[in-house]
Image (tube, rainbow, N blue to C red):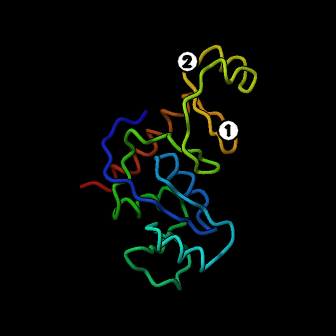
Amino acid sequence: MCAMPSGPQVRFLCDQNLGRLAKWLRILGFDTEYMRRDSDERMRRAMASGRIVLTRRSSTPPSTSVHVIVHDRVQDQLRQLGMIYDLSPGASAFSRCTRCNAPLEEAQPDAVKGLVPDYVHATQASFARCFSCGRIYWKGTHTMRICDRVKSVLETIRP
C-alpha cells in the first residue's frame, strides 16, 4: 500500500455535499461518516463524540470541530484539509470500506471464489472484505494510481 507514516487518526463526518471527499478519506484510512441528508442534530452528536464535521455550508461558523470546505474539486478539498490535518496514508490506508465506512477484514482467496471475477481470483493473492455491506477489495492496478494521486495532492501542501 502507500508506505508513509501517519499521525493519530482523526474521525470525520462529511455533510451531504461531500460524498466524494468522504470516499477519499476512507481510502486514506480515516473513519469517515457521511450524511445523506442535512441534520444539525447529527452534526452535534458527531462533534460530541469527537468527530470533525466537514461541511460545504458557508453559513456554518467554523470552529476547531467544524471546517467549512470551500472547494468544489476533491483534490482541492484534500489540500484544504491537508493544511490542517496529517492526511498521509500509512498502514491504515485501504483499511475501510469506501461504501459504508466499516473496517475491512482479510479474506482468504477460497472465501471470495465466485464473488470476484475469475481472472482476479486467479491473479490476486490477498483480498479484503467488508462484512457490513459485502464488498470485496483487492490490490489491483488502481491501488498504485490512487497512491500516486494522493501523493501528488499532498506534496503540493508540504513546504
- Residue at which label 1 appears: 135
Residue 95 in picture, x, y percent from top left = 50, 40
Residue 123 in picture, x, y percent from top left = 60, 15
| Viewer-closest of 64 and 44 | 44
In the image, what residue occupies the spot 40% across and 46% down? 152
In the image, what residue occupies the spot 43% across and 80% down? 62
| Viewer-closest of 146 and 37 | 37
Q: Is residue 143 left or right of residue 110?
A: left
Dot 1: element: loop
Q: CA distance from mark 2 to mark 1?
A: 17 Å
Dot 2: element: loop
- Judge whether 98 appears above or below 82 on screen: above
Looking at the rendered structure, the kind of residue marked 2 is Ala
In the image, what residue occupies the spot 23% across and 55% down? 159
Occupied quadrant, residue 5: top left
Q: What label sits on residue 125 in the rendered view?
A: 2
In the displayed orientation, state which residue is furthest to the left: 159
Q: Is residue 49 left or right of residue 138?
A: left
Q: What label sits on residue 45 in the rendered view?
A: none
| Viewer-closest of 155 and 47 | 47
